[in-house]
Amino acid sequence: MAFGSAGVPEGHVIRSYRVKVMSTRAKHRRATAMLVAGGDAWSFCIDRFHARIRAGLPNANSLIQLWPDQKAHGPFGDLSAHCAQDITKAWSSAYFEAIRRKLGLRAALPLKKHHLVPVTWRKGEFTLVPSTGRTRARVELATRRRTEKLVLALSHDHPYDCELVRCVRLVSQAGELFLDLTAWVPVVPA
């Protein structure tokens, strides 16, 4: 999960909470398109890895080496640059974790492509709006420049203070969309 440069404040722990997305068909299609774009960003990393091998070039799978190539590639659907970078970061981490494990344990490189890949929005790239008597709770997600924000209704409110939610992650499971909220939660003394 992306938490930025700030560490967890004293007396807090990190917790996640899953909420079902309740959306119209059009918004469901657009949200699914974001997950497909996430799959495209993941596939870009794999295709780049194979292209470098075919060209006889050395591995260059660190974030410093991946991000300029990703930027040159262009946008991935309506994903913001940060969302695409977070997917690239996840692939790079999986790659280096597999390399480390290969030294002593069985491990496989992350070379399997996925159609839908969860997408994460960092603090400042989403807005949580609590429910009112007339409207459902909702989340507004940032998208690529010059595109309209993605606004999704949620099945119910979450238990966290909106200021302490550090990131949200859009996930597809069994054809349904869910939003995972990750927050700093104060520890209650016993």
Image (cartoon, rainbow, N blue to C red):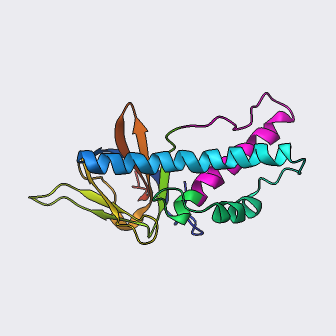
In this image, 112 relative to 21: left or right? Answer: right
Tell me which residue sits at (57%, 69%) in the image.
Answer: 6
Instruction: Between residue 75 and residue 63, name the one nearer to us.
Output: 75
Q: Residue 32: which quarter of the image? A: top left
Q: Position of residue 2 (x, y in %)?
A: 55, 59
Q: Is residue 72 on the magenta stretch?
A: no
Q: Residue 54: which quarter of the image? A: top right
Tell me which residue sits at (46%, 47%) in the image.
Answer: 35
Instruction: Between residue 130 and residue 118, name the one nearer to us.
Output: 118
- On screen, 16 above or below 7? above
In this image, 19 relative to 186: left or right? Answer: left
Considering every residue shown, the one lying at the far front of the view is 55
**Residue 89 appears in the rendering:** yes
Magenta segment: 85-114
Considering every residue shown, the one lying at the far left of the view is 134
In this image, 125 relative to 128: left or right? Answer: right
Q: Is residue 96 on the magenta stretch?
A: yes
- On screen, 186 above or below 180? below
Tell me which residue sits at (88%, 51%) in the image.
Answer: 57
Instruction: Between residue 9 and residue 75, name the one nearer to us.
Output: 75
Q: Position of residue 145 (x, y in %)?
A: 45, 71
Tell me which residue sits at (61%, 37%) in the image.
Answer: 113
